[in-house]
Image: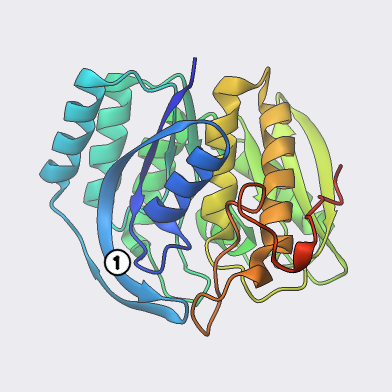
Amino acid sequence: MIPNVLSIAGTDPSGGAGIQADLKTFSALGAYGTTVITALVAQNTHGVHSVHQPPAEFITAQLDNLFEDVHIDAAKVGMLGNAEVVRAVADGLRRHAPHYLVVDPVMVATSGDRLLASDAVTALITELLPLADLVTPNLPEAADLLGEAEATDEATMLDQLYLLGELCPGVLLKGGHLAGPDSVDLLLLDGEVTRLSAPRVQTRNTHGSGCTLSAAITALRPQRADWYSAVLEAKEYLTCALLAADQLDVGSGHGPQHHFYAWWPQQGGASVHSPLS
């Protein structure tokens, strides 16, 4: 049975992040995508111009109407914007209780634009993270959640991983902001830590990579035996999408990954193979 999965997030007109990236990822990985839109974002590959926040009541209506009709196997939460929306989404998820829930705490865009109001961080921690199975922050987001300085080495990453584990039982702490030839993530599941390393892909097309990874995990979890398998395969998918990203010509800033690298004709005749395989 093809799983139905849900993205609760904001939009991206350039197609590289948010709802648009999530739907592409779901489709690429064999899941049927549904959406609840939390914010309308005017942005491109250079940054965010403005954000229109729908009323929390409308977001609740989207959630309730969807769950009344469609069985949702897994859901992910991305950009929420403000505390009122965080609480509305958390209330809806408590009522409807999807079997698997991934929270990608979207706080700051690749461009540096803030996407979650500072006063909403507490609501995210107290209302939403206790409902999640897995939270997927990058290093700046982890620092924001913990009220600490951003980690600059793996030892500090590990310390922050355990602290995040007190907020959510599963944590994928993404270390892409660290320097070095490899990109190292730390995965905490059932009290066990796994170090996940991949060669750093040299491309400027990194816009929406966090959205894509969390969406990939969400799509794969109902299709795989456990969280570890879903995370590992999602990372491999993202790595391949990054390796193929320069085949696209989308904008002059930070462009998107190539979500359909395995399905579209390869430019130059070269196939993409993940270094993780």
* Residue 2 shows up from this direction: yes
> Within the image, what quadrant is residue 32 found in?
top left
Apparent side of residue 256 relative to residue 236 in the rendered image (left or right): left
In front: 70, or 170? 70
In front: 63, or 32? 32
Considering only vertical position in the picture, is 192 above or below 147?
A: above
The residue that label 1 is drawn on is 41
Residue that appears at 45% across and 19% down: 99
> Within the image, what quadrant is residue 35 found in?
top left
Report x, y in % for residue 3: 47, 22
Residue that appears at 65% across and 66% down: 245
Callout 1: SS: strand
Q: Quadrant of the C terminus?
A: top right
Report x, y in % for residue 10: 33, 55
Considering only vertical position in the picture, is 207 above or below 105?
A: below
Mark 1 surroundings within 10 Å by alpha-carbon count, few (fewer than 14), some (14 through 19), many (20 or more): some
In front: 246, or 268? 268
Residue type indicated by callout 1: Val
Apparent side of residue 8 relative to residue 208 in the rendered image (left or right): left
Apparent side of residue 228 relative to residue 99 in the rendered image (left or right): right
